[in-house]
Amino acid sequence: MICLPTSLAQETCLALGAQAGEKRVAEVIRSGDFDRVRRVATTPLNMVLEAM
């Protein structure tokens, strides 16, 4: 209830939400000067990415 409206109110306005997907999240991570992103774990509710 607060994450998405807060993101929309910020200058970057990414508003990724819970359904952004691995590809979009990896793009955002790479834009933060990380070279590599890989999935290290997955559960029915979570996806854990490692950024290097």
Image (tube, rainbow, N blue to C red):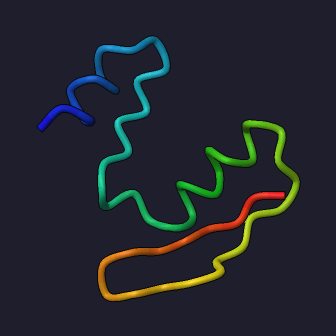
Quadrant in which the N terminus appears:
top left
Residue 38 sits above or below residue 29 on the image:
below
User: Measuring 43% from the left and 33% from the top, which residue is drawn there?
Assistant: 14
Q: How many marks?
A: 0
Q: What is the x, y in percent for residue 40?
A: 65, 81
Q: Is residue 7 left or right of residue 50?
A: left
Residue 26 sits above or below residue 15 on the image:
below
Residue 17 sits above or below residue 2 on the image:
below
Nearer-the-camera pick, 27 or 44 = 44
Quadrant in which the C terminus appears:
bottom right
Q: What is the x, y in percent for residue 47?
A: 47, 74
Q: What is the x, y in percent for residue 35?
A: 88, 54
Residue 18 sits above or below residue 32 on the image:
below
User: Measuring 30% from the left and 48% from the top, which residue is drawn there?
Assistant: 17
User: Measuring 74% from the left and 64% from the top, which residue is drawn there?
Assistant: 37
Nearer-the-camera pick, 9 or 50 = 50
User: Measuring 20% from the left and 26% from the top, which residue is drawn there?
Assistant: 5
Q: Examine the image and state in which quarter residue 41 appears.
A: bottom right
Q: Is residue 51 left or right of residue 11?
A: right
